[in-house]
């Protein structure tokens, strides 16, 4: 399968199509387990992780002649929320793809809780990873079925509790049959914002130690936006989170912002400290985030330039 050339989001949609034909219990990690490229050496199942992540001198290229990460170093503490920002092609998604073992890397190490991820057994490891793509994959069935996806045997009460933990469950009131609403093929009966809310409830039900979130770029109505924001706060709390950030509110709330360029880290800090520094972050901020600020006025000067 030519999976290895697809972005994270396409993998998820391919995954969902593939899994339509499988029973619920076969579905969850079937494709992931089928993946042939990643080599496992004496895999050890992992239990509950705290989620400390270390990239050490990681080298990786999609093709051998073109390295994308060349000696990449990054340590993320357990429970920390890190926002990855940078221009398109900087390598943000690649960092996430290596952590979830979509690709084998060529050099260095990635450690989770001090263990080399090449030695851990994939299914148990991936149960500890919550991946939220830009456009969450939904399959035909009810909202409840879709939330239940990572834990096929989860009782109704757990599904409901997860849904209600996202913005107090207010978003369910806008659905004709609440949790029993049919989402349509690939979620076509739901708005993009509602699909994201389903994805957050699904994440809470999965309860992973680590979250990799590729934030949606499409704008949604202000009410749904507020519900997503509130849902995100709950869904990321207490987990190690790597957010490929596209929303200003997310980067402002991140514990640390990592600015990437050409596969490396060029700057890191908090939103305020990086704005004061007037460096690479300001460039990224002016390009992608400044217009999202409530104080933004078209034509006002660029920050830090
Ligand atoms: P974006 O914001 O556009 O998603 P990004 O910062 O996430 O960008 P990556 O997708 O990680 O960037 O890409 C890093 C580099 O790797 C880019 O030069 C890109 O062209 C290249 N690349 C990404 N995916 C593949 C692939 N499947 N095959 C070959 N090259 C790829």
Image (cartoon, rainbow, N blue to C red):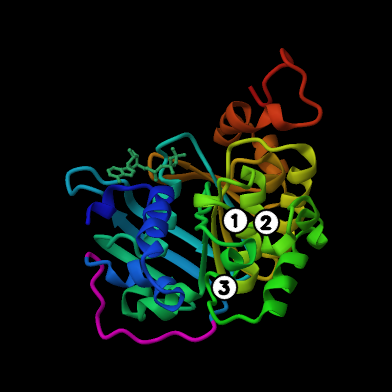
Q: Residue at x 39, y 78 (%)?
A: 123
202 above or below 213? below
Dot 1: element? strand
Q: Are marks 1 and 3 in contact (CB under 8 Å)?
A: no
Q: Are marks 2 and 1 in contact (CB under 8 Å)?
A: yes
In space, the residues marked 1 and 3 are separated at their CA atoms by: 16 Å
81 above or below 296? below
In space, the residues marked 2 and 1 are separated at their CA atoms by: 6 Å
Q: Residue at x 61, y 57 (%)?
A: 182
Q: Which residue is mark 1?
A: 82
Q: Quadrant of residue 88?
A: top left
Q: Nearer the viewer, mark 2 or mark 3?
A: 3
- Per the picture, the main secondary structure of the magenta-coloured stretch is loop
Q: Point out the image quarter for the C terminus.
A: top right
Q: Which residue is mark 3?
A: 208
Q: Which residue is mark 2?
A: 255
Task: Inspect the magenta stretch and tell me whether residue 125 lies in it.
Answer: no
Q: Earlier in the sequence, mark 1 or mark 3?
A: 1
Q: Earlier in the sequence, mark 2 or mark 3?
A: 3
Mark 3: C-beta under 8 Å from nearest atom of ligand 1: no
Between 212 and 225, the residue placed more toward the observer is 225
Give the numbered dot on residue 170: none
The crowd level at tag 1 (other Cα within 10 Å; few <14, some 14-19, many 20+) is many
Q: Nearer the viewer, mark 1 or mark 3?
A: 3
Task: Inspect the magenta stretch and tell me whether residue 45 lies in it.
Answer: yes
Between 258 and 129, the residue placed more toward the observer is 129
Magenta highlight range: 37-48
236 above or below 276? below
Q: Are marks 2 and 3 in contact (CB under 8 Å)?
A: no
Residue 82 image point, x, y percent: 59, 55
Q: Quadrant of residue 108?
A: bottom left
Residue 248 image point, x, y percent: 68, 40
């Amino acid at each position: 399968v030519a999976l290895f050339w697809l972005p994270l989001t396409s993998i998820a949609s391919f995954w969902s199509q593939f899994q339509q034909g499988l029973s619920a219990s076969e579905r969850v990690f079937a494709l992931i387990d089928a993946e042939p490229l990643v080599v496992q050496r004496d895999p050890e199942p992992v239990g509950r992780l705290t989620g400390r992540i270390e990239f050490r001198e990681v080298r990786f290229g999609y093709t051998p002649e073109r390295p994308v990460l060349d000696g990449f170093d990054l340590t993320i503490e357990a429970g920390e929320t890190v926002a990855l920002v940078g221009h398109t092609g900087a390598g943000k998604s690649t960092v996430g793809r290596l952590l979830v073992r979509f690709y084998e890397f060529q050099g260095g190490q990635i450690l989770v809780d001090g263990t080399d991820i090449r030695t851990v057994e994939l299914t148990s490891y991936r149960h500890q990873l919550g991946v939220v793509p830009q456009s969450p994959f939904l399959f035909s069935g009810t909202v409840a079925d879709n939330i239940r996806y990572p834990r096929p045997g989860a009782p109704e009460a757990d599904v409901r509790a997860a849904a209600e933990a996202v913005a107090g469950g207010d978003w369910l009131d806008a659905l004709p049959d609440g949790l029993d609403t049919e989402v349509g093929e690939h979620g076509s009966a739901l708005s993009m914002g509602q699909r994201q809310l389903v994805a957050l409830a699904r994440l809470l039900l999965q309860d992973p130690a680590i979250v990799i979130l590729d934030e949606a770029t499409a704008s949604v109505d202000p009410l749904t936006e507020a519900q997503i924001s509130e849902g995100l706060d709950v869904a990321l709390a207490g987990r190690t989170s790597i957010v490929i950030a596209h929303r200003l509110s997310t980067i402002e709330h991140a514990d640390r912002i990592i600015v990437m360029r050409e596969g490396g880290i060029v700057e890191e800090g908090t939103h305020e400290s990086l704005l004061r520094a007037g460096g690479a972050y300001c460039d990224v901020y002016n390009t992608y985030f400044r217009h999202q600020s409530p104080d933004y006025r078209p034509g006002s000067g660029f920050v830090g330039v």
